[in-house]
């Protein structure tokens, strides 16, 4: 990795600490020491954990938003009479939500995040 700040052309900078690599370092070297490599690895691991925590919070927030909205809206429907078309639309959307929730559970339990064809078709019909 060549630094743009390097004073001379061809100077290479350690990815871990930012110091110049020794001139006799291997051509593919990226770190000045194993300690520097370990620090970089730990920093990258912390960043991955933080990203995963943020994704987890996004998922939990989506659930919370849905439950809160349903809890607010459904009681207002007490005297609403649904037409056949409205009922059909609600049932289709409930089926879409159930399929999505099953997919989320499978992803959490197995790590498999790929959608099957039926789920992709259901979600595509939005």
Image (tube, helix red, strand yellow):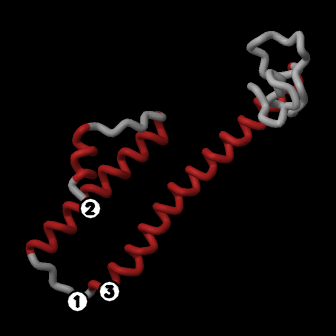
Residue position for label 2: 94
Crowd tier of the residue under label 1, counting other residues whose Cα lies within 10 Å: few below 14, some 14–19, many 20 or above: few
Q: What is the number of the mark on residue 23? A: none
115, above or below 31, in the image: below
Q: Quadrant of residue 17?
A: top right
Please report contact status of discs 2 and 3: CB closer than 8 Å, yes or no.
no
Give the mark nearest the N terminus, 2 or 1: 1
Crowd tier of the residue under label 3, counting other residues whose Cα lies within 10 Å: few below 14, some 14–19, many 20 or above: few
Q: Nearer the viewer, residue 9 or 52?
A: 9
**Whole-percent x, y for residue 103 in the image:** 37, 45
Q: CA distance from mark 2 to mark 3?
A: 18 Å
Q: CA distance from mark 3 to mark 1?
A: 8 Å
Taking the spot 44% from the left edge, 40% from the top edge, the residue there is 107
Looking at the rendered image, the disc whose residue lies closer to the viewer, 2 or 1, is 2
Q: Is 116 displayed left or right of 22 in the figure?
A: left
Give the mark nearest the N terminus, 2 or 3: 3
Q: What is the number of the mark on residue 79? A: 1
Q: Is 69 displayed left or right of 8 in the figure?
A: left
Taking the spot 48% from the left edge, 42% from the top edge, the residue there is 108
Q: Quadrant of residue 117?
A: top left
Q: Is 30 displayed left or right of 60 in the figure?
A: right
Q: Quadrant of residue 72?
A: bottom left
Taking the spot 78% from the left edge, 21% from the top edge, the residue there is 30
**Which element is circle 3 on?**
helix
Q: Quadrant of the C terminus?
A: bottom left
**Which element is circle 2 on?**
helix
Residue position for label 3: 76
């Amino acid at each position: 990795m060549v630094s743009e700040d390097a004073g001379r052309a061809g100077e290479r900078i350690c990815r871990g600490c930012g110091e110049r690599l020794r001139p006799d370092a291997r051509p593919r070297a990226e770190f000045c020491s194993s300690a520097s490599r370990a620090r970089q690895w730990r920093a990258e691991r912390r960043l991955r954990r933080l990203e995963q925590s943020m994704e987890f919070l996004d998922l939990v927030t989506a659930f919370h938003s849905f439950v809160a909205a349903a809890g607010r809206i459904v009681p207002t429907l007490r005297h609403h009479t649904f037409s056949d078309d409205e009922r059909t639309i609600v049932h289709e959307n409930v089926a879409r939500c159930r399929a999505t929730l099953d997919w989320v559970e499978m992803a959490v339990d197995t790590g498999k995040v790929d959608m099957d064809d039926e789920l992709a078709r259901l979600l595509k019909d939005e």
